[in-house]
Image (spheres, rainbow, N blue to C red):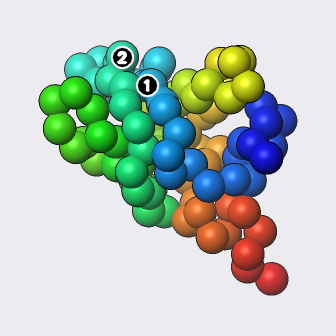
Amino acid sequence: MITAENITSHELIGLRTEIVESSNSQIIGLNGTITDETKSMIIINTANGTKMIAKSNNSWKFSVDNKDVILDGSKIAKRSFDRIGGKA
């Protein structure tokens, strides 16, 4: 089960997210549902279509258990397989 404490070790696909800080001011506030992710990118389905956004250089807000969790992109800038501990 995903909690605010262990979100960095879980799959992010399917979660709602919003960019709250970014080196690119044009994407602050961009929000939607994560449809896929790679080592360095998150693919979000937004109201204006699908967007590919770099994980690093952004702060991401996720809602988990009715709590907002804000993560620096560098904490999730790994392949999901590596992040969830699948690599020995």
Does the rendering let one see residue 75? yes
Q: Position of residue 54 (x, y in %)?
A: 38, 46
The crowd level at tag 2 (other Cα within 10 Å; few <14, some 14-19, many 20+) is: some
Q: Amino acid at mark 2?
A: Gly
Q: Quadrant of residue 23?
A: top left
Residue sitting at 68 percent across and 61 percent down?
83
Residue at left offset 72%, top offset 63%: 84
Q: Does residue 54 appear in the picture of this structure?
A: no
- The alpha-carbon separation of the residues under discs 1 and 2 comes to 5 Å
Q: Position of residue 6 (x, y in %)?
A: 80, 43
Contact, CB < 8 Å: mark 1 with mark 2? yes
Q: Residue furthest bottom?
A: 88
The residue where tag 2 is placed is: 29
Label 1 sits on what residue type?
Ile
Q: Residues within 10 Å of mark 1 (few under 14, many from 20)?
A: many
Per the image, label 1 sits on a secondary structure element best described as: strand
Residue furthest to the left in view is: 48
Location of residue 45 in the rendering, given as x and y in whole percent from the top left corner: 30, 40
Residue annotated with mark 1: 19
Residue at screen point 24% across, 42% down: 51
**Which residue shows up at 24% across the image and 20% down it?**
26
- The quadrant of the picture occupied by the C terminus is bottom right
The total of numbered circles placed on residues is: 2
Eyeballing the image, is 7 above or below 68? below
Q: Earlier in the sequence, mark 1 or mark 2?
A: 1
